[in-house]
Image (cartoon, helix red, strand yellow):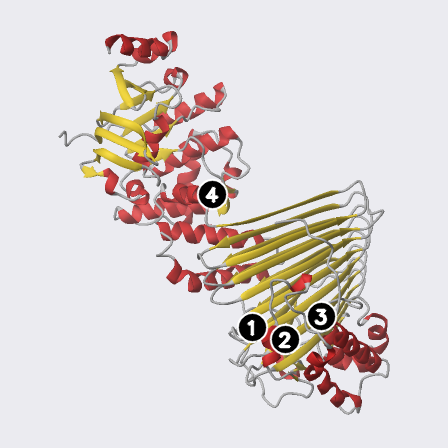
Amino acid sequence: MSAVAPATVRPVEPATEVDPWVQPFARLESGALFPQQPAWVFPLRKAGLARFAELGLPTLAHEDWRFTNVAPLKGLPFAPTLAAPTQRLADGELDARPFARLPGDRLVFLDGHFVPGLSRVGTASGGGVVTSLAAAFRTHAGLLERHLTRYAHGSANPFTALNDAYFTDGALIHVPAGRVIEHPVQLVFVASGEEEGRAQHVRNLILAEAGSQFTVVEHYLGRGTATTVTNAVTEVVAADQVVMDHLKFQDESRAAYHFAAVHADLGRASQVNLHSFALGSRVSRHNIHTALNGEGLECVLNGLYLTDGDQLADHYMVVEHAQPHTASHEYFNGILEGRSRGVFHGRILVRPGAQKTDAKQTNKNLLLSDDATVNTKPQLEIYADDVKCTHGATVGQLPPEQIFYLRSRGLPLETARRMLIHAFAGEIIDRVRCAPLREELDRLVWDRLEQDTQIQVGPHA
Amino acid sequence: MNTTSILDIKNLHAGVAGKAILKGISLTIGPGEVHAVMGPNGSGKSTLAAVLAGREGYDITAGEARYLGQDLLELDPEERARAGLFLAFQYPVEIPGVNSTYFLKSALNEQRKHRGLPELDAIEFLKLVKEKIKLLDLNEDLLKRAVNVGFSGGEKKRNEIFQMAVLDPTLAVLDETDSGLDIDALRVVSEGVNKLKAPGKAQLVITHYQRLLNHIVPDYVHVLMEGRIVRSGGKELALELEERGYDWISRELQLAA
């Protein structure tokens, strides 16, 4: 680990490199694809496209992308899923998938297009809005015009710019003041994975009015084996005293490229937890940007990545303390096997005047094979003088003294190892406030670890 | 060889990374006996405990240790535990994320399974825990926490003896269980250990100070210095050490040499 200079933003690719990514936009020019969208949307798309053309696809020379190589994308046809897919999701297709048994509202999308047949709405939101974005352009155009792209705007992330240009659908969630929604609102994004290069661009907007309490799950999964691209952007606005858990569960196919960004604008005395569970994809990159804009708020960024084979899981966080008396806690644990790689980039920015900031960042990594690697990079930029900022990172194997302690009580080596690995993941899972969700996550992660570690138990005796 | 003994150590040599620490230990412990091994810092006390429990990283260069007639040093740590050997750690390690109750129940059932006994269900286990925890005057809430996490030094040591009470070993090795305990905690821990004394079982108490032996009264006391047992005797040997210190024995040894 070393101190790192603030990241610089610069175009790193000549414009011709991005041509294949820009050309499909012509299909949007006619207006035939999204006839229902208000007139103000197209200029936003166009601005996004222009910004993408300017930023270019990131390369390893870019400070923010030093460890995550997206060059293989250039070898793929770029096929944004602008039109509704011809494939269908069968009625019971999601029944055996994670979280399927949790009650509550659920919106399902296939290749970035809403699937009404598998969705259920209005069962639990109690006067709030849970709807597809495409529908909301007709029903809640004013709300969207006030908020959409406002919080992710100006991002230096080229994928966010690309999402501005090409987003098809996603969710609008609007929870009225004081409303408590008992069951998690689920957003399920399925990549069909039947054609190389299909790129779904999904867009979500979550508006939490003062004092509301709820949980949102964004669940990304794939069903084919083709190399697909997901590019998701979620904007969250949490007003004063909102209590909210946002949980992203990414388990796409091992051939997928997954890019996502959450931009959260947090109000006074809010308690927002942003969770990221990264299990799938060949390459995944999750950006979380939080703007801590109200006194007395507490924000938790909590993540777990499990990788093996040649997977890469990259988390990139920017926590911006903009007001006094705000607290942020980042906890990211990685469990890595095979030749997989983990990347953690945690930037804490304390604005002038944001006194009494309390920022804590921890990144712990468990390497279960000799070939797995981790790049962890804290970055602190502090422009106030009365703050508490700490960061720590560890990379290592299971502690031998803990294994010995467990074995000395009669537990077999294999059980001891599993117990410790489970505990390591459990530290993160335990921070999910919604109990049924937490319990299911625990089972999911445990099952996955059991699958993955079978062949690993022997050589590490 | 005495087949009725619980532990039979003969001429045991062990070390770490080429450095000899134990230089020929012989010690026989019979059923119902309590033995104390005393010695100054660096004499090899903790190495003896570690080697008996099977901690990795030690080279056994000569000698043998038989436990209930079988070659102890051949066994993995978990096999030793299942055979009824227990080590109360000098520094019990914290294990974040592993719940104390879950851990202990798994350990007990693992041991029962290997002895052909039925596993205890949650209710039976809880009953056992409630009975044993009283011995140690330990707060039941501690068992809801992760193993040793957030425990005070004294609580950690009491938790070791509580685990010993639940697992009910044939041979308990107590490695400096008194270190870091105040006088009240020392009394509680000692009483717990004394209640676990039984005719078919044995205890090996390793300590630097005599004060523990005021509470856990040994049948035999052995003095360990520079990797050898240089003197053995009854409980009065401990009192003599308390009075005269370890130097006295060092000087006598030098004179004899």
In this view of the protein, which residue sits in the foreground, A97 or B24?
B24
Q: Is residue B199 above or below residue A290?
A: above
Mark earlier in primary sequence (2, 1): 2
Dot 3 amino acid type: Val
- Tell whether label 1 touches label 2 (CB within 8 Å): yes
Q: Secondary structure at mark 3?
A: loop
The quarter of the rendered structure image containing the N terminus of chain B is: top left
Chain of the residue that carries numbered disc 2 in the rendered image: A
Q: Nearer the viewer, mark 3 or mark 4?
A: 3
* Circle 3 residue: A12
Q: Residues within 10 Å of mark 2 (few under 14, many from 20)?
A: many
Dot 4 amino acid type: Ser
Both on one chain, marks 1 and 4? no
Drawn side of residue A178 relative to residue B200, left or right: right
Q: Residues within 10 Å of mark 3 (few under 14, many from 20)?
A: some
| Disc 1 from disc 4: Cα separation | 35 Å
In this view of the protein, which residue sits in the foreground, A437 or A400?
A400
Residue in view at x 51 percent, y 34 percent = B139
| Disc 2 from disc 3: Cα separation | 22 Å
Dot 2 amino acid type: Thr
Drawn side of residue A266 relative to residue B154, left or right: right
| Disc 1 from disc 3: Cα separation | 29 Å
| Disc 2 from disc 1: Cα separation | 9 Å
